């Protein structure tokens, strides 16, 4: 293929330049070659960054998995790709690989207080001191995260309402469930538990970030404020 007549990025209309195109149309509008062109930044005197990227992709039959297997030394064999550009390509593809490995599994959906109890067993079973957790939920009641807010002694823990709702907002939660354990095994909520639940429920209602339940966890069972109709 003759690359001598390639148009340089600087000669393209603004909407066709990879960086500008990404800003104007979004990342999904870019081809693989355009994304790689952004990584390498520039081509050669006779080859634009986009065409150089196309040339590299063609060498691996446009297979990104095959491209990811190329080493820095392999990439340096292409005219116009020095060590710095090769490292950029390798690094970007490695980030993509790691993201794929770490992709979250399907989120657990909470449909009942029993679901909450089962969800919290790994964190609270056999615990000898009190812990207070938030279960952060999406609009469809899928679990975003289990977040510990505080840890105390055998008979109580301090909970700061500001920390509770800042945590929920930071994770873009649409609703929350409160959970804390009673190491003593007592299922009944204390007066302090009731006051805290009422206060957090009222704040959540005012913030349009509802508290759906408060579950007291023990190794032998649980108590749900929602199930008992006292939320």
Image (cartoon, rainbow, N blue to C red):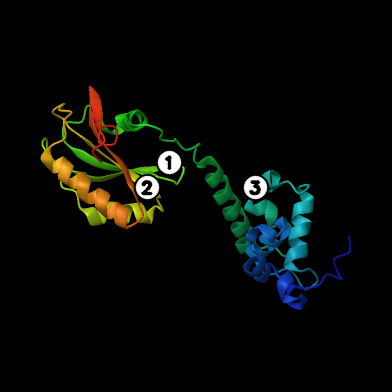
Residue at numbered disc 3: 68
Mark 3 or mark 1: whose residue is earlier in sequence: 3
The residue lying furthest to the front in this view is: 229
Image quadrant where one finds the C terminus:
top left
As drawn, the residue found furthest toward the top would be: 220
Sequence order check, earlier mark of 2 and 1: 1
Q: Nearer the viewer, residue 158 or 84?
A: 158
Q: Secondary structure at mark 3?
A: helix
Task: Look at the image and tell me in which quarter the N terminus lies.
Answer: bottom right
Q: What residue is shown with label 1?
A: 141
Side of 202 where 183 appears, left or right: left
Q: Position of residue 135 (x, y in %)?
A: 34, 42
Whether the residues at callouts 2 and 1 have beta carbons within 8 Å, the answer is yes
Q: CA distance from mark 3 to mark 2?
A: 40 Å
Considering the numbered disc 1 on the image, is that residue within a helix, a strand or a loop?
Answer: loop
* Residue 94 or residue 177, whichever sits in front: 177
Check disc 2 and report its element: helix, strand or loop. Answer: strand
Q: Residue furthest right?
A: 2
Label 2 to label 1, Cα distance in Å?
A: 8 Å
* Residue 49 visible from this viewpoint: yes
Q: Tell us which disc is closer to us: 3 or 1.
A: 1
Q: Quadrant of residue 43?
A: bottom right
Separation (CA) of disc 3 from disc 1: 37 Å
Q: Tell me the residue that label 2 is attached to.
A: 175
As drawn, the label of residue 17 is: none
In this picture, residue 87 sits left or right of residue 129: right
Mark 2 Cα-neighbour bin, 10 Å: few <14, some 14–19, many ≥20: many
Q: Earlier along the polypeptide chain: callout 3 or callout 2?
A: 3
């Amino acid at each position: 293929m003759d690359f001598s007549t390639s148009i340089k990025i600087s000669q393209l209309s603004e909407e066709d330049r990879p960086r500008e195109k990404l800003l104007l149309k979004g990342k999904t509008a870019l081809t693989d070659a355009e994304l790689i062109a952004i990584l390498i930044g520039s081509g050669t005197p006779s080859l634009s960054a986009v065409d150089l990227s196309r040339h590299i992709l063609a060498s691996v039959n446009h297979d990104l998995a095959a491209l990811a297997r190329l080493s820095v030394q392999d990439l340096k064999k292409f005219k116009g790709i020095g060590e710095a550009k090769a490292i950029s390509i390798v690094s970007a593809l490695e980030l993509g690989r790691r993201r794929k490995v770490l992709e979250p599994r399907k989120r657990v959906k909470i449909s009942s207080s029993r679901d909450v109890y089962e969800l919290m067993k790994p964190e609270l079973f056999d615990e000898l001191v009190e812990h207070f957790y938030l279960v952060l939920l999406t609009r469809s009641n899928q679990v975003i995260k289990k977040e510990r807010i505080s840890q105390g002694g055998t008979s109580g823990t301090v909970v700061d309402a500001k920390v509770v709702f800042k945590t929920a907002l930071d994770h873009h939660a649409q609703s929350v469930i409160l959970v804390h354990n009673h190491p003593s095994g007592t299922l009944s909520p204390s007066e302090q538990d009731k006051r805290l639940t009422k206060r957090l429920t009222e704040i959540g209602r005012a913030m349009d970030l509802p508290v759906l339940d408060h579950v007291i966890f023990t190794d032998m069972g649980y108590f749900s404020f929602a199930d008992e109709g006292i939320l």
